[in-house]
Amino acid sequence: MDAGSDTGSDDADADWRLHGVRVVHADELDVNTPQTPGMDRAAAITTARAGAEKLWAGTVTIHPDAKTGAHHHGPLESVIYVVSGRARMRWGERLEFVAEAGPGDFIYVPPFVPHQEINASPDAPLSCVVVRSGQKPVVVNLDLPDVDANPEQVHWVDDIHPEP
């Protein structure tokens, strides 16, 4: 077998029809997943729906001018892709930091980071796709009594894109 035809599978008799690509249609999403006040989550890619072992993916909709309760996802990493609308993210022990993202932007949320999603639009829903690094539906809703009234605006800063 040449390198171009190697599938990387140890099972030469794999039934790719049953154990290959899965499509989960929009009307097949599972809303029976842990929720946070202010948002509607629906699971798409899970072990039960697609056979995924290491990822969870789904959708999140936040209604106009709404915000979620503060929460975190335990040891899981999360990636949020903004499909439409304007996302305002707050994070920190007192939600003391804030950043915004729009359609086509990605948001990364590290493990255990307290955060809150806010729909920055008063009249349009915020629609996102969420991917997490594990299958456990970890959602730890938090009661943060001392939320910062004036969060610090944070711009994406890294070694490649320094702050202006």
Image (cartoon, grey):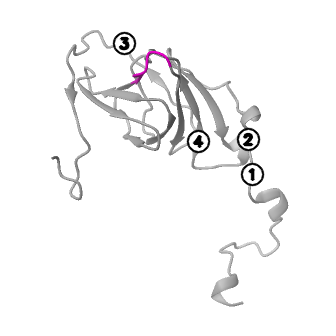
Vertical side of 6 occupied by 105: above or below: above
- The quarter holding residue 159 reads bottom left
Among the two numbered marks 1 and 4 on one chain, the one whose residue lies closer to the N terminus: 1
Q: Which residues are magenta?
A: 117-123
CB under 8 Å between discs 2 and 1: yes
- The quarter holding residue 92 reads top left
Among the two numbered marks 2 and 3 on one chain, the one whose residue lies closer to the N terminus: 2
For disc 4, the marked residue is: 56
For disc 3, the marked residue is: 143
Front one among 104 and 17: 104
Q: What is the x, y in percent for residue 20?
A: 76, 60
For disc 2, the marked residue is: 49
Secondary structure at badge 4 equals strand
**Which residue shows up at 67% across the image and 25% down it?**
31
Vertical side of 105 occupied by 92: above or below: above
Q: What is the x, y in percent for residue 135?
A: 58, 41
Among the two numbered marks 4 and 3 on one chain, the one whose residue lies closer to the N terminus: 4
Q: Give the farthest residue toward the left.
A: 164
Among the two numbered marks 2 and 1 on one chain, the one whose residue lies closer to the N terminus: 1
Amino acid on which the number 1 mark rests in the picture? Arg
Among the two numbered marks 1 and 3 on one chain, the one whose residue lies closer to the N terminus: 1
Amino acid on which the number 3 mark rests in the picture? Asp
| Residue 22: numbered disc | 1
Q: CA distance from mark 2 to mark 3?
A: 32 Å
Q: CA distance from mark 2 to mark 1?
A: 9 Å
Amino acid on which the number 2 mark rests in the picture? Arg
Left or right: where does residue 30 sit relative to residue 116? right
Q: CA distance from mark 1 to mark 4?
A: 14 Å
Q: CA distance from mark 1 to mark 3?
A: 38 Å
CB under 8 Å between discs 4 and 3: no
